[in-house]
Image (cartoon, helix red, strand yellow):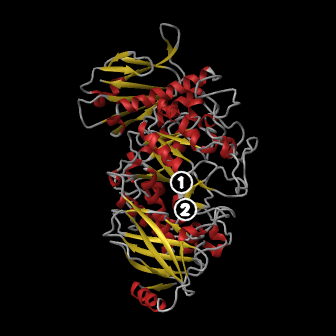
Amino acid sequence: MRSISTRQGLVALAAMCMVAVSTIVRADEQDLKVYPPHWWAGMASPTLELMLHGEDIADSRVTTDSVGVTIDDVTRLDSNNYLFVSLNLANAKDQTLSLRLLDKKGTVRVVPYSLHARRKHSSQREGFSGKDAIYLIAPDRFVNGEVNNDEVAGYREGVTRDKAGGRHGGDIQGIMNNLSYVSSLGFTQVWTMPLLENAMEDYSYHGYSITDFYNIDPRFGTNALFKEMSSEAREQGIGIIMDMVLNHIGSSHIWLSDAPSSDWINNNGRFVGTTHKRESLHDPHGVDADKKAFSNGWFVPTMPDLNQQNPHLANYLIQQAIWWVEYADLSGIRVDTYSYSDKAFLSAWTQRLMAEYPRLNIVGEEWSVNPAITAYWQRGSYRRDGYESALPSVMDFPLQQAVIEAINSKESWSSGLTRIYETLATDFLYGNANDLVVFADNHDMRRVFTQVDGDLRRWNMAMTFFLTTRGIPQVFYGSEILMDNGTSDDHGIIRADFPGGWPDDKVNAFTGKGLTDSQHWATSRIKTLLHLRRQYPALFEGNLTHYAPEEGIYTYFRHTDDPASPLIMVVLNKQSNQGLDTENTPVVSLDVGKYERMLKGKTTLVRLRDDKQFRVNETITLSPMSASVFIVK
């Protein structure tokens, strides 16, 4: 690594100006790219490192006479085609500044670079929280809103809708056209699988093989359209959460043929599979070799693993995340395969993001069902090794597994609903369990309706729980209409097309055409529960108090510290029946007197599904295998 100081650059420039300059070329008139493509004045960090990429630019001397802008450092690595320019913007105002690159041939490249004024209150943007509910969308499988981008020149994979793993044509325009549907269900946030360029030969639809960190894949739309979607979503009360990949890239990325340095890609750019043993990072008895094998290994040959220990790559990944938050006015970030990246880098990445946006939310994917490992990454959690993390949220995989097991298994002292109780009892491990993202399923696992064997009652128990428990709920698109994946675990089947997203679809979930009675009921149930969250946001950002399950009944309350505030009482009942009511309908009786501590000062329970009222001193009836929600006043 060779570094050129500003003073050295000026001296060299003065010497070279003694000879005739052969050519002056504007950078935008040649094949020279600058990352980030622009920036903003007034950011929390005054330092910006530009990555310049162009043929034989590594030996260029760089200067600027722009007001308030100084060059702190210029660094070239192993490739002759990259140059890293560190700018100090502490005194910079919004402007178009000029960088001048003088090479040994006497050619001067003029690089115009824009510093924009920031959006008002941008640094204080509010991220998603417990008052929100997230709708997860696979963009390629939701709605094809613009057929003219199904095939794009220069991109090898076009639409093959009959292929489970192929591109099906869904895009940003399709999401924009149906934001009102998302809002009508009651969702306040949208998380989409990655939308950045995946210029891969095939299997590019999922978005996790990124080949350009600063451009939306043209088969999804454009940067400007993504920004427009974010703006329109905000007008409808919906925030946009961007799915970011820090751990790896796609094998068609230019860094595979022209990397800035020899250590840019782990394992010298050759495939060595990860062990997936995330436990090695926490093992007090472990060895460094196991940690390295986990962190430095690749997922698959088409996903080269990035070496975030390289400080310039680390800067690149930090800055591109900030760039998208600022450019697209994001409300949050979801980070794919979070723990697979370098630990020290993740600490720096989260701290820098939260320094720029103290109220932003970021959720990391740590696919472990051990809450001790999940909790490790969240800020505020205890860590025996003193590791510093500023990550606000983690995906709650332990709770997801516990709920499905609880609903599907028989009741006993060690199985059934007690699995939920036991898992929530470990919340002491987390810095803030209310900030976790909870979910019944997602794009990488069997759909929840499949997980409960197509049983509508069990589906209702699962969805009711996840939409009323502590944390921030996320629902996978199609769960509201009981989409399943049959007997196939193929991700292309799990991420099936949303009915109504294509003109020739016989079923249209947006209008309700062709849906079954069960699907209509499920959609209504989701709407009812999400409306409850909107009606009582303080309760769902507040406390959870639960009672140990007894005889197949598990009860918990959502409440605040204000004794005058209403409560939400939720009862999961796995009993079959105890008898019949006056209409000969099977029922289970529940004496709510056991919840006297929570119900003190309250008089009435109003059942959500039918507004039927009960007095707090009377026995209430529950349907067998049910999830009942009561508003307590």
| 519 to 58, vertically: above or below | above
The residue carrying mark 1 is 368
User: x, y (%) of residue 117?
Assistant: 36, 58
Element type at mark 1: loop
| 558 to 400, vertically: above or below | above
Q: Is residue 410 left or right of residue 64?
A: right
> Which image quarter is the C terminus in?
top left
Upstream in sequence: badge 2 or badge 1: 2
265 and 596: which one is in front? 265
Element type at mark 2: helix
Mark 2–mark 1 contact, CB under 8 Å?
A: yes
Q: In which quarter of the view is residue 143 placed?
A: top right
250 and 146: which one is in front? 146
- Is residue 39 at least partly visible in the picture? yes
| 233 to 206, vertically: above or below | above
User: x, y (%) of residue 76?
Assistant: 52, 81
Q: Residue at x 49, y 81 (%)?
A: 75
> What amino acid is labelled 2 in the image?
Arg
User: x, y (%) of residue 622?
Assistant: 46, 20
> What amino acid is labelled 1 in the image?
Ser
78 and 57: which one is in front? 57
Give the distance between the C-alpha atoms of the residues marked 2 and 1, in whole angstroms. Answer: 8 Å
The residue carrying mark 2 is 278
390 and 407: which one is in front? 390
Q: Is residue 22 left or right of residue 89?
A: right
Q: Residue at x 58, y 66 (%)?
A: 294
